[in-house]
């Protein structure tokens, strides 16, 4: 019989998606996870991964076709060697780690005159560009919870990517002025009938890559009360007319948008059009829009980079001062045009997530991969730097999708003798500064 | 047959991202098609298909999904699928992961 | 005469050996400057950065060794912000708009600002808990809550921004009269102003309530301003260094007459007359500078109006249960009728209010202009001819209706020291930090302003140049800046107020709002001391 010596319940901030749920409760028995309350399957999996065997356990350096195990100091030394000898390194990732680590990454990139890019460039980068074009009317999620009577999800399926979004912040949440979902309406706009679309009061199906036209058509209907003369084939106009009616009746409306808008068609123009529509709607009632950010601290990465350099992602320090031009200083463009000779990935998997045409260009490049888990990037890397899982085994600060900062907490003490992202980067920074 | 590729996430895919990526190629190796499209390229549930764009191709199993519109292929995003995605200079750093024109056909 | 400094304070005699000697002959030695209203850190500043990448290309600052130390014009990055303030001879700065829910963000940026002591003001004018407690007349509990929320966010004082109007803006509406009822809350903006000013006095905060008036920016708002100030007339004065009951922030934006943009005119005489005849009000200028800037305020409804006026970029970012906010780029133009009058209003207020101890020079950075323009304002105040040179260039219609040309007053150097150092320090309750006296904190700025025997106001160009870059900035007895070059790293303290207590009633109250209305847990709302750069609580950490 097992005798339990010590059972405690710890509050955790879930380090998975942009919802950054901070009401998760983990019961520990003798330091081991016994149960997890209030987490979705994604968060549960992430927290449990602390005890998984599939982890990067050793500091590895490539030698011939093999990787040999080295000490942390040797790994840091070799990392500093590669970084210092690189002509133009790119430091990429940063969305699955703390703001403290992100700050160190920026300092390293600046010293090296390299590039600091973030996964934003291939997920919501277009939304950031559109914000710089025209600005975004937004609010924190609690405003939606307490006030929104019309909720629109556009190109986003929270049931698969942000499972607790409905319950904590939107359709199913209870707020001060809207006490239950009977008093809310939901419209889902997507290219296919998603699981979220099935729960919606109204589902509007649009043709792939046509969102810009649909937003513009909707804007026209809102403004003039009738559809534009152009015959729109990308969407059912009656559906759109009905949606416009619901939109005009709402007291407080919100549009949550996902990669279905940021990644398709005309890219940032989709968002420019959406923001323009939201501005127009504020003439009638209150409207806001909030991006459905994927990684738990991708918003933090944009915030940290903005206040450190002025720019949210894709910051190129090669001229000695921060320079930002998405499409030129973004990771896929730099790799595709062979402009960088070293890729350091921190808490991300560029080789597993970037387009094949871009990944093929990394063959022969020096790669340093810092990650708690094995990925295609760590597999191809010249140096593998294992770390603790941020938000599970170590703490820090992260920003929710709406820009609310929330502390990450170490839930349990790791069984592995590893450093956090922050500690490891600090060592690398010290080594580089000393060597220079 | 020409079709539009939509990649998207799922709960299971989300579970596999952190630490279990090696399972993706076996667990997520399917693509959803409208039944009419399946007839058109003559595949049944579970038949192997090839998705092609320029010189890249990937092999997946077809899965019937009547809620999908015609001409759309829906694949759960994972490293294998990204092989089809091209570089596009005009997207200001973004990758064209959704709404990509591809060729799909049955593997005999 | 020698000024002696040891261990961070002014002393009568130096005990240690081989002190550093600075020859400040024919230089002007002033206490370190105090900026009591400057938006330099936090969520809205970063959103401003996100909105305007073009603005970040306007200023790149490199250190002496060629290292890039920061970027940005209206929203300089934290290190650059500390550097610029230090170069200007400043020692203490106040971030005046912290949404409680995002206080952690403000502290994260403030940690990166070197050289300066920092304070911040908490946005409480649209807080649900506060409005509910006022409506329920639970005023003792209100005092406890205010202390708790200041402590939780590690902020220093209370800021009211268009009280009640932020809540209305959450529904896309605004409140134009301080006696109008706030939607869904059976109270008025006046109730909020009165009760928080009273609470502020009761709980002994070191600085008065800072008020951004309702109707800010709109023609005819001087009446709202005077009405708001009258609301707290009967509260008497406060104890301590800072006797004022209310501090009117960026008064320039709240002192307009007229009923439309066409009839827009200056209300400075009325507002100055009120301030001259009452002792409970202090204010800062919010002087505008003709230039491009990024406006940012918690007054969301006003920013929407400004966006509609300019038709340019607009960010809105409301914070649940607490405040609104908005960001709009703006260019103040000499030839624009309204802008020209706004320019005059700020200077008129400074010249018409007789007692310099009641006011502080600010631009409401970056709303009226950037803080690096302060020396220009000093030159306008000290030199009538210099003012006239600017008046010549402004909108000709405006030129004829402003009263500024008829004001002959010129500030003495001594008066400018009061309005940039002593008065703001006194208003903020940190007088000792801006006093040259034995035992006081040794914050000094040494300037070369030319021949001190002559009238310094005579040559405004030299004056501006001299004030823009201190020869030395000495902070807590350390030389941190010499001729615009950082000498050594130094991080100032962060002052905060408030405390916790054991009251069950308070716990119950706060827990209820977190359970029902907030989207974060209470424990994550509280900023820990470890997240703050050198925290110093000016009140008791635990109160009864």
Image (cartoon, coloured by chain):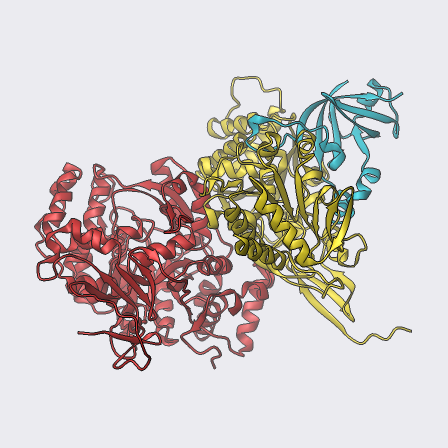
Chain colours: A yellow, B cyan, C red
Q: Residue at x 50, y 45 (%)?
A: A138
Image height check: is B12 above or below A332?
below
The number of discs equals 0
Question: Can residue C266 be seen here?
Answer: no
- Residue A324 image point, x, y percent: 48, 38
Residue A8 versus residue A221: which sits nearer the camera? A8
- Residue A134 image point, x, y percent: 45, 36
Left or right position of C197 against C447: right
Q: Residue at x 63, y 54 (%)?
A: A77
Image height check: is C311 above or below C148?
above
Q: Residue furthest right?
A: A1
Residue C379 versus residue A112: which sits nearer the camera? A112
Left or right position of A39 against A327: right
- Residue C278 image point, x, y percent: 20, 67
- Where, quadrant-wise, is the N terminus of chain A in this rendering? bottom right
- Choose top left, top right, bottom left or bottom right for residue B43: top right
Left or right position of C7 against A315: left
- Residue C145 image point, x, y percent: 47, 70
Residue A252 versus residue C374: which sits nearer the camera? C374
Question: Can residue C464 be seen here?
Answer: yes
């Amino acid at each position: 019989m097992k005798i339990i010596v010590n059972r405690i319940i710890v509050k955790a901030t879930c380090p998975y998606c942009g919802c950054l749920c901070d009401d998760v409760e983990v019961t520990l028995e003798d330091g081991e996870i016994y149960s997890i309350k209030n987490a979705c399957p994604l968060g549960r999996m992430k927290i449990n991964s602390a005890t998984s065997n599939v982890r990067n356990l050793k500091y590895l350096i490539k030698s011939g076709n093999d990787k040999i195990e080295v000490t942390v100091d040797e790994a840091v030394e070799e990392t500093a060697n590669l970084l210092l000898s690189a002509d133009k390194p790119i430091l990429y990732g940063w969305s699955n780690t703390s703001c403290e680590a992100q700050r160190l990454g920026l300092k390293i990139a600046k010293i090296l005159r390299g590039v600091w890019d973030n996964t934003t460039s291939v997920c919501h980068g277009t939304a950031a560009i559109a914000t710089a074009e025209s600005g975004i009317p937004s609010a924190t999620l609690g405003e939606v919870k307490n006030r929104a009577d019309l909720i629109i999800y556009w190109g986003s399926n929270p049931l698969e990517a942000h499972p607790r979004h409905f319950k904590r912040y939107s359709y199913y949440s209870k707020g001060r002025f809207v006490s239950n979902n009977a008093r809310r309406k939901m419209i889902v706009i997507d290219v296919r009938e998603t699981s979220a679309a099935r729960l919606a009061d109204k589902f509007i199906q649009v043709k792939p890559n046509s969102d810009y036209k649909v937003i513009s058509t909707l804007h026209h209907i809102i403004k003039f009360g009738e559809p534009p003369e152009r015959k729109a084939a990308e969407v059912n106009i009656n559906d759109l007319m009905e949606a416009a009616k619901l939109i005009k009746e709402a007291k407080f409306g919100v549009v949550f948008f996902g990669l279905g808008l940021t990644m398709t068609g005309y890219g940032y123009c989709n968002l420019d059009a959406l923001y323009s529509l939201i501005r127009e709607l504020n003439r009638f009632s209150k409207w806001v829009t909030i991006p459905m950010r994927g990684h738990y601290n991708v918003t933090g990465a944009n915030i940290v980079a903005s206040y450190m350099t002025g720019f949210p992602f894709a910051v190129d320090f090669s001229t000695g001062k921060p320079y930002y031009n998405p499409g030129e200083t973004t990771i896929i463009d730099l790799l595709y045009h062979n402009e960088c000779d070293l890729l350091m990935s921190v808490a991300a998997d560029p080789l597993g997530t970037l387009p094949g045409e871009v990944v093929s260009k990394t063959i022969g490049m020096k790669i340093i991969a810092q990650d708690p888990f094995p990925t295609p990037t760590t597999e191809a890397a010249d140096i593998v730097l294992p770390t603790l899982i941020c938000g599970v085994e170590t703490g820090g600060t992260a920003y929710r999708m709406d820009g609310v900062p929330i502390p990450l907490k170490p839930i349990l003490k790791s069984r592995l003798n590893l450093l956090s992202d922050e500690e490891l980067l600090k060592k690398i920074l010290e080594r580089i500064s000393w060597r220079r | 047959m020409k079709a539009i590729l939509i990649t998207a996430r799922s709960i299971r895919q989300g579970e596999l991202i952190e630490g279990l990526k090696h399972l993706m190629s076996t667990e997520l190796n399917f693509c959803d098609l409208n039944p009419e499209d399946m007839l058109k390229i003559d595949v049944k549930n579970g038949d192997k298909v090839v998705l092609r764009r320029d010189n890249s191709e990937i092999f997946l199993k077809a899965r019937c999904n009547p809620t999908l519109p015609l001409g759309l292929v829906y694949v759960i995003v994972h490293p294998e699928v990204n092989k089809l995605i091209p570089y596009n200079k005009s997207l200001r750093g973004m990758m064209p992961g959704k709404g990509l024109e591809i060729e799909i056909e049955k593997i005999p | 005469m020698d000024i002696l400094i040891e261990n961070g304070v002014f002393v009568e005699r130096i005990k240690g050996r081989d002190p550093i000697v600075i020859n400040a002959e024919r230089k002007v030695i002033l206490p370190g400057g105090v900026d009591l209203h400057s938006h330099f850190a936090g969520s809205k500043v970063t959103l401003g950065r996100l909105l305007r990448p073009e603005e970040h290309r306007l200023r790149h600052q490199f250190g002496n060794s060629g290292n890039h130390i920061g970027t940005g014009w209206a929203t300089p990055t934290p290190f650059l912000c500390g550097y610029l303030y230090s170069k200007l001879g400043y020692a203490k700065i106040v971030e005046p708009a912290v949404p409680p829910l995002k206080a952690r963000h403000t502290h994260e940026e403030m940690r990166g600002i070197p050289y300066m002591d920092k304070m911040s003001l908490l946005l409480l004018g649209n807080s649900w808990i506060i409005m509910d407690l006022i409506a329920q007349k639970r005023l003792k509990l209100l005092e406890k809550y205010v202390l708790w929320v200041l402590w939780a966010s590690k902020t220093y004082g209370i800021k009211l921004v268009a009280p009640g109007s932020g809540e209305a803006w959450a529904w896309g509406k605004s409140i134009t009269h301080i006696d109008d009822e706030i939607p869904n809350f059976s109270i008025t903006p006046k109730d909020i102003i009165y009760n928080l000013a009273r609470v502020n006095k009761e709980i002994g905060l070191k600085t008065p309530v800072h008020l951004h008036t309702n109707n800010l920016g709109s023609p005819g708002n001087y009446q709202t301003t005077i009405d708001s100030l009258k609301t707290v007339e009967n509260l008497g004065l406060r104890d301590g260094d800072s006797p004022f009951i209310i501090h009117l922030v960026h008064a320039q934006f709240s002192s307009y007459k007229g009923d439309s943009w066409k009839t827009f005119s200056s209300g400075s005489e009325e507002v100055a007359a009120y301030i001259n005849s009452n002792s409970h009000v202090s204010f800062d200028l919010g002087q505008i500078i003709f230039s491009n800037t990024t406006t940012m305020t918690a007054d969301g409804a006003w920013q929407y109006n400004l966006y509609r006026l300019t038709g340019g970029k607009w960010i809105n970012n409301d914070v649940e249960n607490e405040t609104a906010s908005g960001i709009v780029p703006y260019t103040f133009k000499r030839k624009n009728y309204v802008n020209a009058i706004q320019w005059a209003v700020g200077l008129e207020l400074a010249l018409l209010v007789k007692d310099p101890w009641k006011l502080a020079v600010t631009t409401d950075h970056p709303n009226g202009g950037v803080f690096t323009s302060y020396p220009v304002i000093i030159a306008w105040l000290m030199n009538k001819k210099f003012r006239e040179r600017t008046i010549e260039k402004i909108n000709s219609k405006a030129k004829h209706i402003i009263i500024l040309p008829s004001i002959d007053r010129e500030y003495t150097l001594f008066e400018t020291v009061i309005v940039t150092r002593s008065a703001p320090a006194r208003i903020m309750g940190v007088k000792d930090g801006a006093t040259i006296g034995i035992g006081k904190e040794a914050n000094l700025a040494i300037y070369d302003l030319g021949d001190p025997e002559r009238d310094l106001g005579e040559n405004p160009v030299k004056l501006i140049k001299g004030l823009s870059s201190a020869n030395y900035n000495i902070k807590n007895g350390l030389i941190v800046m010499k001729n615009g070059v950082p000498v050594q790293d130094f991080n100032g303290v962060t002052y905060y107020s408030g405390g916790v207590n054991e009251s069950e009633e308070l716990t119950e109250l706060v827990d209820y709002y977190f359970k029902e209305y907030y989207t974060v847990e209470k424990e994550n709302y509280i900023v820990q001391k470890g997240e703050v750069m050198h925290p110093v609580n000016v009140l008791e950490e635990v109160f009864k």
